[in-house]
């Protein structure tokens, strides 16, 4: 929290539609990183999507093999930070929208846990995507990832 | 205090729930904007009071802040609430819910 000056304006709808999600996971940074890019693990917490790195892109497929997302990797600093484009190809309306951006930040808390922060931004031109991923879309991914890494079992079978 | 305790304690206050409701509608709100929102609800509260509530919410993981130049932006983080949901609901309801969803699809496919 800060006491620096803010614009002393009344509350108006945000100009940006940045979404921020955060969870503490009892795991090493490497284990969290691996879980993000290993398709065998992502199917167990990420809406059953098979997510894999293909060259300089990150690509995901649904259980039926449909292409769900495909985006360029913008930054990769294992096991700390991964930034990639997001396109909602799983949804005909979302698929028409411009690419948004997902940032994964893995911070070692030094006590056997990591703080995983997921920021989904550049959503201004992608309202359909923003609404489809918001709330339960991302919260179940993060809570499922935590459960998988801490118990070795997915949240739901 | 354990994580869940912090979350329940943070939620057990109407002003803090008002702050979370405001952040749900206005992601990235500044402290000043949150102050205005609280004032608009008729709650008499100083800037310091709002900051104190935000600190409790932040420590519970329900609010995440990030910097944008000189501004501190506040975001609602719903993951702790999802974890509480998982603990008492998801594990028990996902099976039956899936059965009902499958039944619905099967019946609708026959129409």
Image (spheres, grey):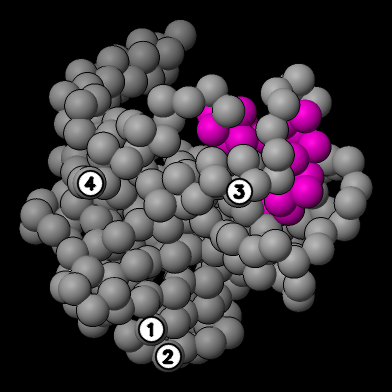
Query: Pointer 1: residues within 10 angstroms few (<14), some, or many (20+)?
Result: some
In reply to whether residue B32 is colored magenta, the answer given is: yes
Query: Can the viewer see residue A32 in this picture?
Result: yes
Q: Do labels 1 and 4 share a chain?
A: no
Kindly report which numbered mark, 1 or 4, lies closer to the viewer in this rendering: 4
Q: Residue at x 16, y 41 (%)?
A: A157
Q: Image height check: is A104 above or below B1?
A: below
Callout 4: 10 Å neighbours few (<14), some, many (20+)?
Answer: few
Which residue lies under the disc numbered 4? B1
Q: Is residue A29 left or right of residue B7?
A: left
Cα–Cα gap, marks 1 and 4: 28 Å
Q: Pointer 2: what residue?
A: A77
Q: In this figure, which residue is indicated by the disc labeled 1?
A: A80
Real-space CA distance between mark 1 and mark 2, rounded to the nearest whole angstrom: 6 Å
The reply to whether discs 1 and 2 touch (Cβ–Cβ < 8 Å) is: yes
Q: Do the residues labelled 3 and 2 touch (CB within 8 Å)?
A: no
Residue A146 position by quadrant: bottom left
Q: Where is residue A76 in the image (x, y as percent from the top left)?
A: 46, 88
Question: Distance from label 4 to label 2 (Cα)?
Answer: 34 Å
In the rendered structure, the answer to whether residue A90 lies left or right of residue A13 reads: left
Q: What type of secondary structure mainly makes up the magenta span?
A: helix
Q: Is residue B23 magenta?
A: yes
Task: State the image coordinates of residue A81 (x, y, percent, origin top left).
Answer: 44, 82
- Chain at numbered mark 3: B
The relative height of residue A84 versus residue B15 in the rendered view (above or below) is below
Distance, label 1 to label 3, CA atoms, is: 30 Å
Q: Which residue is drawn at the image coordinates 41% and 25% (left, top)?
A: B12
Mark 3: which secondary structure? helix
Residue named by callout 3: B51
What element does badge 1 sit on?
loop
Q: In this view, does B57 lie above or below A29?
A: above
């Amino acid at each position: 929290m800060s006491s620096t000056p803010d614009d002393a304006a009344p509350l108006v709808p945000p100009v940006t539609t940045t979404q921020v999600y955060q969870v503490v996971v009892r795991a090493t940074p490497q284990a969290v990183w691996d879980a993000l890019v290993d398709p065998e693990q992502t199917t167990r917490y990420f809406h059953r999507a098979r997510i894999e790195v293909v060259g300089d892109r990150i690509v995901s497929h649904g259980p039926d093999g449909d292409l769900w997302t495909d985006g360029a990797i913008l930054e990769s600093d294992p096991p700390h930070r991964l930034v990639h484009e997001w396109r909602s190809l799983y949804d005909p309306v979302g698929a028409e929208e411009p690419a948004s951006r997902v940032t994964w930040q893995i911070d070692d808390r030094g006590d056997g846990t990591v703080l995983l922060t997921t920021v989904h931004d550049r959503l201004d031109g992608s309202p359909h995507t923003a609404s489809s991923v918001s709330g339960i879309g991302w919260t179940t991914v993060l809570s499922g990832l935590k459960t998988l890494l801490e118990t070795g079992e997915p949240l739901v079978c | 205090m354990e994580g869940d305790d912090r979350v329940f304690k943070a939620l057990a206050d109407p002003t803090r729930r008002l702050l979370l409701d405001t952040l749900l509608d206005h992601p990235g709100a500044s402290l000043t904007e949150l102050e205005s929102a609280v004032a608009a609800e008729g709650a008499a509260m100083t800037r310091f009071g709002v900051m104190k509530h935000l600190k409790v919410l932040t420590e519970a993981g329900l609010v995440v802040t990030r910097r944008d130049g000189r501004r501190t932006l506040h975001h609602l983080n719903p993951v702790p609430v999802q974890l509480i949901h998982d603990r008492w609901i998801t594990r028990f309801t996902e099976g039956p819910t899936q059965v009902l969803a499958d039944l619905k699809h099967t019946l609708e496919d026959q129409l």
